[in-house]
Image (spheres, grey):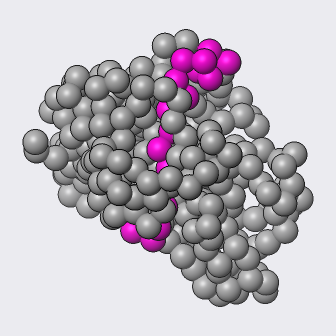
Amino acid sequence: MTNEKLRVYGIPDHLKFREGEGGFPFIVISNRSAKALISMYGAQVLSFRLNDEHEDLLFLSQKSYYDEGKAIRGGIPVCWPWFGADLSDPQRHNHGFVRNTPWTVLGTKAVSDLETRVKLGVMESNKSKALWPYAFALELEISVGKALTLELTTRNTGNDVFSITQALHSYFQVGNIQQVKVLGLENTRYFDKLDQGAQKTQTGGVTVSEEVDRIYTDVKKELIIDDPAFDRRIQISSTGNNTAVVWNPWMETTAKMADLENDDYQRFICVETGNVATDIVQIPPGSESSLQTKIQIIPD
């Protein structure tokens, strides 16, 4: 979109556009509740901080790439229409193609002086059809207030049924990963991706003292990140999903990743709302499906 078209969607005292790193257009939201930063490349929320909080809820790597064709490391990338490796063609990029695609602003709204909404969209193109041969309209509505809410809606605008896996790949900033505990997954079955996908059962809360990469199944609709170092509890509420992913690369894997500092693994945990692994969403022609996550700080 041109700068002139973007200006139409600006809202005084709520929402403006600026050129960000790599020349990508960024959306800056500031209201009486919170501040947020969104990249239109990938429709990726990069930052969300409540006005009465010192620390951002989201982690964003200082070594992130801001280049066409590469993903931004941190925030909330949109993984779609496949999560992880594309099983039909392992040569294609992990996590689909929309996180590496420019999106369009579809609408903005000041709900009140405490809440601001923006809707972004992307649809099929010749480039997308070369990777995934279906007609679609994908929308992401982002609400910035006392909570951060993302709703990802997939519409099948073609004549053929298609199936997707997807995730809102949230990177949460934490004070000290070794003190963090993820609650709400106790006694839940999961696939351990670091043990050839072996099925296991979670005992107690999820803690991190080594690399963790797990797909939890039949998950509860509310999970909590207990972060004593930052003295806060982050609640993650979700709808439209049966699975969630917990990931931290730990020391050795982080050292191999050029877009992370060697000690960044200490500062984030990914708890991802998604339809992953066996949680496949089938969408007939003319139908739609939505995935939603709501993130907020709750009292102890």
Camera-side residue of 76 and 228? 228
- Determine the residue positioned at 19% across, 35% down: 232
Q: Position of residue 201 (x, y in %)?
A: 44, 54
Q: Position of residue 233 (x, y in %)?
A: 21, 40
Report whether 16 appears left or right of 198.
Answer: left
Is the residue 29 above or below the residue 217 in the image? above
- Determine the residue positioned at 41% across, 31% down: 208
- Determine the residue positioned at 54% across, 18% down: 251
- Point out the image quarter for the C terminus: top left
Residue at the farthest top position: 262
Camera-side residue of 275 and 128? 275
Which range is magenta?
A: 236-256
Report whether 235 appears left or right of 216.
Answer: left
Is the residue 286 above or below the residue 206 in the image? below
Q: Is residue 197 visible?
A: yes
Q: Position of residue 69 (x, y in %)?
A: 76, 37
User: Based on the displayed image, in which of its 4 quarters is residue 23 positioned?
Assistant: top right
Residue 252 lies in the magenta-colored region: yes
Camera-side residue of 167 and 4? 167
Q: Position of residue 260 (x, y in %)?
A: 57, 19
Camera-side residue of 110 and 93? 93
Residue 64 lies in the magenta-colored region: no
Report whether 278 appears left or right of 268.
Answer: right
- Determine the residue positioned at 40% across, 50% down: 202
Q: Is residue 108 visible?
A: no
